[in-house]
Amino acid sequence: MLAAGPSGFYNAPTTKGVLLVVGALTLLSSIFQLKTDFHLQLVPHLTTHHQFWRLITSHFAFSSSTEMLFGGLIIYHLRIIERLFGPAKYVAFLFVSAVTCTLLNIAVLVTGSALGLNVLPAGPYGVIFAALYQFYSIIPTMYEFKVFGVAFTDKFFMYALAAQLMLSHMPGSIASAVCGLLAGAIYRSDMAGTRRWRFPESIMRLTVKLLLPIFSSSPAIRSTATTFENRSSSSSRTSDRPAQAMREYLDVLSTGGAPQGATPRAPSESDVSTLQSIFTTATQEQAIQALNATNNNLEAAVQYLLENPAPAPATTNMPAPAPAPAPAPSALP
């Protein structure tokens, strides 16, 4: 219900690194009783003791295991944003969002001190809710369902986790979440060229050389059977492993596979338009091909285009026309 493509961290090294760093620092701060060194407080930390380093460290660790649980689940499922942006753009997005949230946090503490808002909880609230705004803006709704007559979408589960995190340390957590949403909106609006900014090429090359081998992940191994009959025959050869057979059957349902010989349904215009709105460089034929390859499963088609990006249109250099032959001299009578 919170599907974001293949399981694991394939094509999402930044998400993996953020989870490991935040999780490790949260655990270490609890073991060594350092939780009080991560939250952000105007008085006395900033105004009296001038502990401005808290503006940076406040983004790197949660203050409780409950916040880490919900925050980690959200970060993990938001890896679909990294797969859509690409690691280089996603790293730049996280940095811009963190800087913007830091400035907004200072403004909130200064203006909210008169209302009793003097403390903001520790944790990457800003970047989480900034990424959640991108999830709301660019990831389409895949399906709807009703509970006691009330309509919900598949995004409801992500928003429920975010609401739990937002309400964990009121009122400071609400203020941090609002700052994150504002940072996400600022990034999405491309104010001051935020969406076009990237780290310098030299820093990216060094990062790829040093960190990518540590945080990169290989794709999950999937069954090579592509039809229901092939999967059934494969599971029959391992009848002593019913759990494996059940996973194979659920794979057929989740990836939109159809029984062999079934007549494929023509892709709808709305699905084709949705794919082209997400992948602006994809042509109509490429969107239809992705839907046909996934049996019109829109979510699977999005992942298909993420793993098989459309090539940039090549510029064909037409050869210059050959010069016309000079007319033959006419013979004089």
Image (cartoon, helix red, strand yellow):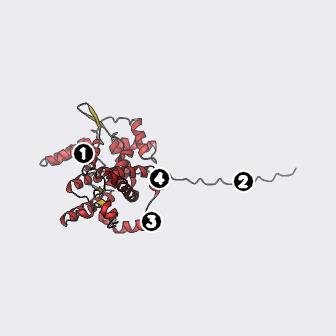
Question: Disc 3 to disc 4, how far (Cα)?
Answer: 23 Å
Q: Amino acid at mark 4?
A: Met
Q: Which residue is mark 2?
A: 325
C-beta proximity under 8 Å, tags 3 and 4 = no
Q: CA distance from mark 2 to mark 3?
A: 52 Å
Q: Secondary structure at mark 4?
A: helix
For marks 2 and 4 on the same chain, the one whose residue lies earlier in the sequence: 4
Which residue is denoted by mark 3 in the rendering?
Answer: 201
Mark positioned earlier in the residue sequence (3 or 4): 4
Q: CA distance from mark 2 to mark 4?
A: 58 Å
Q: Residue at x 36, y 68 (%)?
A: 209
Q: Are marks 2 and 4 in contact (CB under 8 Å)?
A: no
Mark identifier at residue 191: 4
Q: Position of residue 302 (x, y in %)?
A: 36, 46
Q: Depth-wise, is mark 2 or mark 4 nearer the camera?
A: 4
Could you tell me which residue is drawn at 26 percent across and 64 percent down? 37
